[in-house]
Image (cartoon, helix red, strand yellow):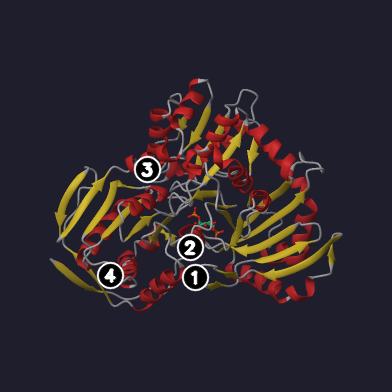
Amino acid sequence: MTRIIATKPYDDQKPGTSGLRKKVPVFQQENYAENFIQSIFDALDGYKGKTLVLGGDGRFYNREVIQKVLAIAAANGFGKVMVGQGGILSTPAASNVIRKYKAFGGIILSASHNPGGPHEDFGIKYNIDNGGPAPEKITDAIFAKSKTIKEYKIADIGEIDIDRIGTVEAGGMTIEVIDSVKDYAELMESLFDFKALQKLFESGFRMRFDSMHAVTGPYAKEIFEHRLGAAEGTCRNFKPLPDFGRHHPDPNLVHCKHLYDEMMKPDAPDFGAASDGDGDRNLIIGKGIFITPSDSLAMLCANATVAPAYANGLAGIARSMPTSRAADRVAEKLGIGIYETPTGWKFFGNLLDAGKATICGEESAGTGSNHIREKDGLWAVLLWLSILAVRSESVQQVATKHWAEFGRNYYSRHDYEGVDSGRAHALMEELGGKLASLAGTSVRGLKIEKADDFAYHDPVDGSVSEHQGIRVHFEGGSRVVFRLSGTGTEGATLRVYIEHYEPPTGKLDKDTQKALADLIAAADDIAGIARHTGRDKPSVIT
Ligand code: G16
């Protein structure tokens, strides 16, 4: 039986950079999740009788919302839902299932790298039929629906057993519980030369992969230890936990410091990597060397032809605007297109669909390719392993040679988290107001060449996205970018992205923070970070 439940709108269901992210108690308010799920369906057309893919990163409240989506999808007329066993699908795995089975779309329950637990974060996002995050016109429509919603439909289908693989009929809809890992592992096997990677591990190559008690545990175990024969113990923290063991499942140098420390020891393994809550981000650390996500993108692109999937070369590279321009130099050398998009993986979808870009990447630890329409942590690790296997070199050697050829983009991101939202917006407004007067002035001896507020003109559909971050360019190619995060759930997070280019003839082995010291000081002078935020240093430096 289907029931129609009267409800009242909430005014705060605007999807951010990647779906709706809020604290669990917010989602637990009466009809809060139900409203948003119904608003997603209300914003879509033509899904009756079609297939929806459903899964999440297993965080606290995942199972409850999986049941809600099933009941609401049945009442709204979906023909079938394919749900990951136990409600689990990593974000890249969900993207793959949507594409492989030609589903209408998918709902992914995740707050990505944000912490999980009864008082921590939860999230819901919708992906379209290409497997990628819904573009802005859909997320805007969902938000509009959420502000006027009066009722939602729900089917009385009881609690569905999502732990047993198989198919059941409920509420006039088919529910298929699928293996969360199998399709994804097969996809990886089709992209990379698994025999070459098996040989790498047979030769004694040692790796650590840290799943941070999040969704990639079962994927990593299957791929690295079972299919590639990496030694048992390669995978760490591989048991997914609803609260991620009370850690932030954010693979950066703060929250994954234990891996960094291990990789800096004299007897470190050859390769260290980690991924986040929903498996789309990656952290890459070689023995004795951390590779920034921006550099990783450039190095992956420069070497991608080692993998069978990219043997014929890349069509183009896309990066988000704040990502360093290391990849631009690779694109230039390869003679292929380089695209600069706003932050948010959703902006890559059109470029990938149109065949303009093959590999995309972001400074926020995301890299991926046209194999799916999400960033993909394990994919990045497999491509790195392929490079090391084919070149028979260490990460350090690959990086050193890369910088010697292309020069080095010293790069760092400084985050000021949990800043009062009014103060953070005041900073951005003040900065925006003085953009026109910055060009030609000097700060700390650095001459400002130009400053602007980044707007993106999508070359495929012509859509325009404005106010995507403020850029200050200095003479000589250095740059500072300011923007407010769209993924936080508490106050505002100011992100300051700092980049300095050192040509191949320059000094390529400096300490990053030291190499950027003047620019960091200039950023504060220009934007008044300390004055506005009341902070004398960032909360996270990556
Ligand atoms: C999401 C988006 C990414 C974005 C990142 C950071 O990643 O998918 O495209 O770069 O957030 O965004 P912001 O700087 O606005 O916080 P994830 O891994 O959280 O889904």
N-term-proximal mark, 1 vs 4: 4
Could you say which quadrant of the image residue 533 lies in?
bottom right
Res 350 label: 2
Q: Is residue 314 above or below residue 127?
A: above
Any part of residue 203 in sight: yes
Could you say which quadrant of the image residue 195 lies in?
top left
Q: Which residue is mark 4?
A: 46
Q: Which residue is mark 1?
A: 461
**Front-lying residue, 250 or 195:** 195
- CA gap between label 1 and label 4 equals 21 Å
Q: Is residue 257 left or right of residue 489?
A: right
Residue 294 pos. (x, y %):
62, 49
N-term-proximal mark, 2 vs 1: 2
Q: Nearer the viewer, mark 3 or mark 2?
A: 2
- CA gap between label 3 and label 2 equals 23 Å
- CA gap between label 4 and label 2 equals 21 Å
N-term-proximal mark, 4 vs 2: 4
Identify which residue is drawn at 75% across, 55% down: 520
Discs 1, 3 touching: Cβ within 8 Å: no
- CA gap between label 4 and label 3 equals 27 Å
Discs 3, 2 touching: Cβ within 8 Å: no
